[in-house]
Image (spheres, helix red, strand yellow):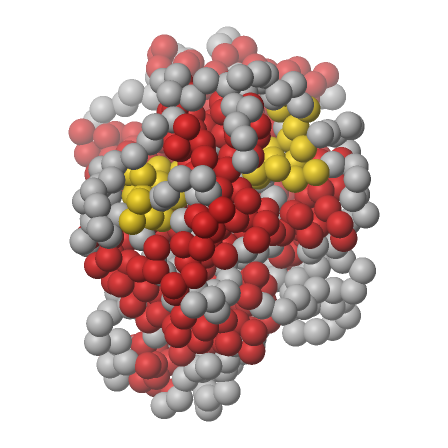
Amino acid sequence: MGETRTVFAGLSHGEIIAWYGLIVVSTAVFLWGAARLVVKYRAGRRDPISQLWRRAGHMFAVVFSHKWISRRDRLTGIGHRLVFYGFLVLFAGTTILGLQTDLTKPIFHWEFWEGGFYLGYKLALDIAGLLLICGLALLAFNRWRRRPARLDYSRPDRPEGGEAGADRRLYRVGDVVFVSTLAFLAVTGFLLEGFYLADADPRFAAWSPVGWVLMKWFRAMGLTGKSAGLAHHVLWWVHGLAALSFVSSIPYTKAVHMLVGPANVAVRDDTAGKRLVPLAADAASEDVGYAAITDLTWRHLLSLDACTKCGKCTDSCPAAKAGYPLSPRDLVLDLRERAEALLGAHAALGLSGAAAGTAAASRAAGGNGAAAANGAAGVSGADPGRRVVLGEPIRPESIWSCTQCMACVEICPVGIEHVPIINQFRRRLVEQGEMDPLLQSTLETIYEAGNSLGEPKRKRGRWTDELTFTVKDARKEEVDLLWFVGDYASFDPRNQRVTRALATILERAGVDFGILYAAEQTAGCDVRRAGEEGLFSSLAEANVAEISKCRFQRILSSDPHSYHTLKNEYPAFGGDWQVLHHSELLLELLSSRALEPARRLGYRVTYHDPCMLGRYNGVYDAPRKVLETIGVELVEMPRNRDNSLCCGAGGGRIWMKEKRAEGSRRTSEQRIDEATSLGPIDYFVVCCPKDVTMYSDAIKTSGHEGALELRELSELVWESLALDA
Ligand code: SF4
Ligand code: SF4
């Protein structure tokens, strides 16, 4: 016998026909499930995408490198890589064999599955099978032996014990079935090979090393010839039926992430959460934000199915850590369950009890799912089809718990966009006036006074009164640098000290700068993230109009929230300028020797990355280099750079009442605990006015007063220059 083997060895004609019949059935079941996914996504709002080739390239780079899966989790990264590549090679091997059996041989009489190709093929598939088994073993070890907290499905946002949505047993069963099915296929594949070799005993058996070992073992047990052939025959059917069942189950089970995960990486918005989508100018009230499942865009509906329940988002969520009723993973899973029950295969099969075809009815009725089909939208509206999700299962208290810190989006291995989804639910709540009274009054204050502290506009420049020099009015004269100061830095007494330190540094460096005085208003970053899109738009328009009247080269911001919005969100309002954070400017001045430190400070400090500067804008190095230049020893906290822990103020949370679980600790206090665990630290360094406020408080309330002090970056630079106040 040459180097090949007979396909369907030992099977009768009837069995071969039955096999092809089963392939047709399983493919049909797969295709129907895939089609239902498409139907489900098409029920969402329109959201055109472009740059398909760039997206495809990016998707391949992410999927094949596994860089998102490996982040902060090497073990899972290695395990998943082994499973992915092992499965891919085995799948390719099956496809190649199918190509010859069903295409090239019957049509072109061309057989390539022989000789050297066959031997290489067998070796490659044996190695792939081994990798697959090793990968599955690693993942199983991680999940069921190491048991990281993030893989515990109990919900931080629902009390234990029977509440709707709190039962996660089916998810646990799904995990076991998924991993064991793949393991079963890999192991039975090897056993099949061993039985075949024990029966046929070809001279090239060693090219299938695992099969060869099994063959030796079977033969030693007396399993040769007919008995081995019989075992092969029986197992062939067991293995084949398991493989077909697995393929047909993909669109309906955890395995769906194999399809939708890469698809979501391809279609996701690279600036998700960073540049929120503006409201359409003519948006009707019921079109604002999300309330019903059909309000989600098709991309957001698709992303729900990509979730692998890895828990990385909830594990990095500051709200969950501080005892707020929010779990980004469970928010995604709740939405997914509701979408599947109302629009997916469950709905089509009548398994969910929901009216099938509601989406089509909704679309036919005019686009917006909630409004068009329900006749009412929102938390309390009548909803016979149960398409409204805002209220239950998506509870307003969960939506308001989010600080919009982006930690979840940053770490999600399949690129799910929690932040814009949450923001859309906030928009609807704001539209309906359902919000924390404190938030409502703060938004009204901003509307009336142009700042969140309710200070008169004319007082915005008062912090300059104590300076020994005059700060230019950029409305009246040309400046090199237009400094957009921000609310806290302008009005809050502790922050004013920082603002004056920075102004003094700029003066010393000979920087030509000015401010807008009374013409500056809140930039609107947190107003937007709180869901008040209308107020944000009017603030953005007013600020862009005032800034546009001035003559300047660049904009400076000492507030990462303002910095982010001016740099990334004002261009949509016509304000396209070069914007610098003060850490970047300080580094520039120190590097060009416009600033010369008089002495090295020699302090031992730790530094907190603000969400808006780090995760939102990738500015991690500038503050660290400034610290290095002024002779400060930086000791990193375990959670640093893109893993930084939010202070808890973002997304408008600083304007809302705390509603945390009893006994929980604020994230700002947890952060100070983290800093003090580093040993003796002189200063906790920040470069965001909200961090100045949050961490000054947290040092007192966490019980660490006296153990360390807070310093803003500018204050340390000022000290290094040995300037007089
Ligand atoms: S943005 Fe931050 S607070 Fe909000 S869900 Fe994500 S991790 Fe949690
Ligand atoms: S949303 Fe993303 S990070 Fe969160 S559990 Fe799902 S896959 Fe994991």
Q: Residue at x 29, y 67 (%)?
A: 538
Quadrant of the image occupied by residue 119:
top left
Image location (x, y in percent) of residue 711: 61, 37
Image location (x, y in percent) of residue 41: 34, 63
Front-lying residue, 345 or 274: 274
Q: Residue at x 61, y 62 (%)?
A: 326
Q: Residue at x 54, y 48 (%)?
A: 495
Front-lying residue, 512 or 483: 512
* Residue 143, visible in the rendered structure: no
Is 239 positioned to the left or the right of 250 in the image? Answer: right
Up/down of 47 relative to 4, above or below:
below
Front-lying residue, 403 or 709: 709
Front-lying residue, 274 or 314: 274
Image location (x, y in percent) of residue 456: 43, 68
Image location (x, y in percent) of residue 280: 24, 69
Up/down of 567 relative to 708, above or below:
below
Quadrant of the image occupied by residue 368:
bottom left
Q: Quadrant of the C terminus?
A: top right
Q: How many marks?
A: 0
Is 141 positioned to the left or the right of 489 in the image? Answer: right
Q: Residue at x 50, y 8 (%)?
A: 203
* Residue 280, visible in the rendered structure: yes
Q: Quadrant of the N terminus?
A: top left
Quadrant of the image occupied by residue 385:
bottom left
